[in-house]
Structure formats: structure tokens, C-alpha cells
Amino acid sequence: REEYVVYKNVNNIVVMKRVLFIAPLFFGYWEKIKNVFESYDMEVYFINQSLSKVNIKYRIIDRLSSKRVRDRQNIRYYSLKIQDVPDDIDYVVVIRGDSLNIEIMHLMHKRFKSAKFVMYQWDSIKMNPVGYEIKDSFDEIYTFDPIDAKEFNWKYRPLFFDEKDCNINVDKDIDIAYFCTLKFKRAQLYKELKLIANRKKLKMFSYLFVDKLTFLKRKYINHDPLYSAISISEVNYKAMPLKETSKIYDRSRVIVDYTTPEQTGLSMRSIESIGHACKLVTNNVFVKEEPFYCKENVFIYDENNFELPDEFIAAPYKNLNTDLYNYYSLNGWIKTILGME
């Protein structure tokens, strides 16, 4: 459609466009995306779609109220927010969109009549059914989930790494890096990784993030054997900032990833391994379908019989070609989402 063509100036930079960007406050990734929009000389209007993080009132209604009450709150919230956005928006870009509904989408279509509406799902529809409910409101839909892409005829697009955070010239002095939110089988995996690192004399860095009350409950009230084996000094009650995480990735030879059974899309951590030139250990078998997959760099483990082969750890990292690197970068991701490829 002609009105959706992306125009560029003589320096191949996008001429000033206006973007309404709606995304969750998830580990600061929204800010990275916003910064790249702005680097393309775009005017960005951001709306936080994580209403539970707006204030205590929103949090209580979001978590404890019925869907009808939540929808009414959300309609008021977005109605007020879009009043500050010009009518002549070129793009409405939605990440996840779990606080949206059909009525809110109607309001935005009525207001932004010439805009191209794009949605990106970095959760599966099983985890975010609202994405399916509002799908007909978008001109383009992308998803990180290969199963959802096939089932709903959406465009498959993996996540990204931020090339500005990557420094592949740093010495790799950490053998294994393991970051996780401490739930599902991740506690068990941590325990097994520690045993392997000690047995093979490998240097391991771990960062276990968990809500304090959840950890204390599981450790001292539920007496969960996995949590009982983890000391308080080994856990963190705040997520590590992205810049600090990136510095650890730069120094790491191997990143270990655990994907829940409900998730088929590749995690952010899996894609970030590309930018930081780290080998990847994961239980997500769908990684075999990716162009960056090779046995030198990726090992798929059985979560019920975890192992980490010596030859995989010892083997050097196999460098990827520039086209692959650029495709999985944040710039490459945004070019896909905006149709600039």
C-alpha cells in the first residue's frame, strides 16, 4: 500500500516519520528500540503498556479485578495517552499488547487513520491470548514463535541483540555464564551446572534472580529441596542491569539457556549469544531451524539428562558471516518490523 512506503533521504536515512510505540517495561528493551527509532530520525511517542507498573492503583486493578474492570481501566488509560499523540502518525508499533483490547484498537484506528499498524509478539499466544484477540487490527504481525507463525499465518521473526552492547574483543575469561529467573527447572539446572563446573574445573558465573518472598517461601516454608540447596547469598532480588549483563556475556565462552516447555520461540539470551560471540547451550530444539545454528556453536541438551560435553566446551567459537550478524541485530530487527529491508 502506497501510504506505507518508507522514504529515505540522500544519505539513506529515513525521512522524519512519526511512530507511536506501545511496549512493556521489560528489562529496558523498550528503550533500546526507541533509541534506534530515533537514530533513524523518527519522532517517537511511547506508551507504557505495563499498566501494573504505572502506579499502585493500576497494579491492584490489573492483578485482582475481573476482566471487565481491567478493560474499563485500560480504555481510560489509552484514551488519555493517545490525546498527546498527533493524528498524522505513520506507524503504530505494538510489542505484546496484552493490556489492549478491541475497543482500544478501534479508538486508535479512528484517531490514526493513515498509520500502518504493526504488532510483534515476543510471547507465544498461549502466554498472551490477547495477541490473537486483537490480531485483525493490524496490517502486519510478526512473532518470535515459529509454531504461532505457521498456525496463524503470521511472519516469523526472531528476537535481537543490541550491537552497541557487544564487544567481541574482550578476553573470554569465563567458561560458563548462567543467568536466570529462578523458577521452573532452572534451580535444578543451576545445581547441575555447579557440579559440572567444579568437576571439570571450569570458571562459572551465575546470576539467579528471584522475588525475595517467593524464594523464602519455597526454601523455608515449602522446604523445596532444590531451593533448600541454594543459599541466600547465591540469589539476587533485583535483575542485573542490561549493560552489566552484556559485559559478562562479552567475557563468556558459553551461555546456558533454559526454555520452558510452553515456549518454542528462541529466548533473548539465545540471540544475544550471537552478538557477543558466545557458544550457546539450550534445551530449545527449534534452534536447529535457525540460519545461525551449527554444532560448533550450539549444543542442545536434554533437560532430564543434562550433560555438557568436553569437546563442545573446548572447541573454538565459529564466527558467523556479516549478513547473519546484521539480521539478528536490533537494527536488522527494526528494519524487518518497519518493512525497510
Image (tube, rainbow, N blue to C red):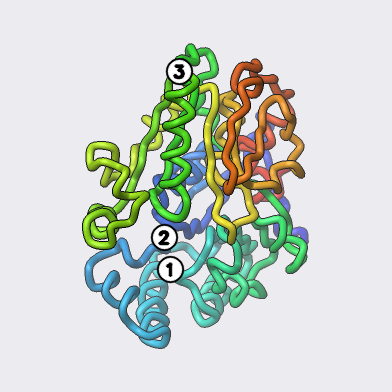
Q: CA distance from mark 2 to mark 3?
A: 48 Å
Corner quadrant of residue 91: bottom right
Mark found first going from the N terminus, 2 or 3: 2
Q: Helix or strand or loop: what does disc 2 sit on?
A: strand
Q: CA distance from mark 2 to mark 1?
A: 8 Å
Q: Position of residue 50 (x, y in %)?
A: 39, 63
In this rendering, is residue 115 above or below 289? below
Determine which residue is flagged by label 3: 201
Mark found first going from the N terminus, 1 or 3: 1
Outermost residue toward the bottom in this view: 68
The type of residue carrying mark 1 is: Ile
Please say if the residues under marks 1 and 3 sit with CB atoms less than 8 Å apart: no
Q: Position of residue 88 (x, y in %)?
A: 55, 62
Determine which residue is flagged by label 1: 82
Disc nearest the viewer among 1 and 3: 3
Corner quadrant of residue 47: bottom left
Relative horizontal placement of residue 245, taking residue 213 as reference (left or right): right
Seen at 73% across and 57% down, the residue is 155
Q: CA distance from mark 1 to mark 3?
A: 56 Å
Seen at 53% across and 62% down, the residue is 96
The type of residue carrying mark 2 is: Ile
Determine which residue is flagged by label 2: 47
Q: Helix or strand or loop: what does disc 1 sit on?
A: helix
Instruction: Give neighbour class at mark 2: few <14, some 14-19, many 20+ (Cα, 10 Å).
Output: some
Please say if the residues under marks 2 and 1 sit with CB atoms less than 8 Å apart: yes
Mark found first going from the N terminus, 2 or 1: 2
Corner quadrant of residue 89: bottom right
Out of 221 and 295, give the one closest to the viewer. Answer: 221
